[in-house]
Image (spheres, rainbow, N blue to C red):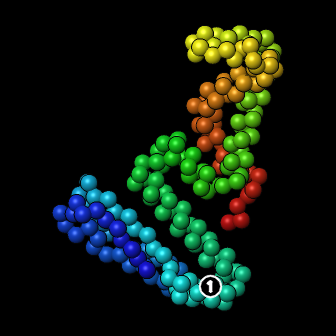
Amino acid sequence: MLNVAFSKTAFHRPLIERLNLLHQGGKIYSKYTLHGCSEHLAVRFFSVLSKEEEEQEKKRIEGLSKYQKEIELRALDKELARLNTLRGINTGELYTFRGKFKALARDYGVAFMAWYWAVWMSTAAMTYGAIEMGAVDAMALIAKADSYTGFDLASKVDPQLGAIGITLVFNEMLEPVRLPIVVLTTKPVVEKLYPKRY
C-alpha cells in the first residue's frame, strides 16, 4: 500500500513520473523519478504493509533458512544505509555535526549512547579534578552569579554540592568541543568493541 500526501499548492509539471515497489525473490526494489517540483511543495511518501501483506511476508520469512535470512538482512541493511545517505544529502544533515550525531544515534543505538555518556563522564571528572586541584572557589563563583541574578544560592548550598554544580555547568560549556570528538570517534570505537559480522 502506498500513500502520498501533498499540499494543494500544486506543481508546474507532474511530480512523479514513476514509482514502483517490486518484491521479487525476497528482495525489495524501489525506483522513482521526481521532477518539476515547485519549491513550496511539501511531499511525504510512506509505505505500510496491509495486514494481509504482513502475514504473507511472515510466512515467506518462516520458509527461509538461517543463511537466506542473513543474506537478505545484509541486503536490506545495505539498502537502508544507502537510502539514509541519500536522505542526508537531500536534507543537508550529512554535512553537519548535528546531522551526523543523529545518524550515529540511529545506526549505533545503545552503543553510541554508552560512548557519548562515557565521554561526558570523563570530561566531567576532569573538570571536577581541575576545580579541586586548581583550588577554584565554587562558592565565590556562585556568589558572583547571585549578584547578577538576585538569588541567594551561596548561603543555601553546601560547598561540596556547589563544586559539583559548577562542574556540571562547566562540563556543559564543553559540549561544542565534546560533540565533534564523539562524532569522530564513535564509529572506530564501537566497531573495535563490537566488530561487524559482515
At which x and y percent is residue 168? 70, 28
Q: x and y percent of residue 20 in the render?
A: 38, 78
What is the quadrant of residue 56 in the picture?
A: bottom right
**Where residue 52 sits: x, y (%)?**
53, 88
Is the C terminus in the top left, top right, bottom left or bottom right quadrant?
bottom right
Q: What residue sits 78% from the left and 23% below the top?
A: 161
- Horizontal side of 12 relative to 67 (left or right) equals left
Q: In this view, does 63 lie above or below 104?
A: below
Q: In this view, does 117 lie to the left or right of 16?
A: right
Mark 1 burial class by Cα count in 10 Å: few <14, some 14-19, many 20+:
few
* Residue 53 location (% of width, % of height): 52, 86
Residue 154 sits in which quadrant? top right
**Relative to 38, does residue 63 appear above or below in the rendering?**
below
| Residue placed under numbered mark 1 in the picture | 58
Q: Is residue 162 above or below residue 60?
A: above
The residue nearer to you, when weighing 170 against 87, is 170
Q: Residue furthest left?
A: 12
Visible residue check, residue 5: yes
Closer-to-camera residue (52/152): 152
Say which residue appears at 62% left-offset and 85% top-offset: 58
Above or below, comparing residue 186 to residue 198 in the picture: above
Q: In which quarter of the image is the N terminus?
A: bottom left
Q: Which residue is drawn at 36% across and 71% down?
A: 4
Looking at the picture, which amino acid does disc 1 mark? Lys
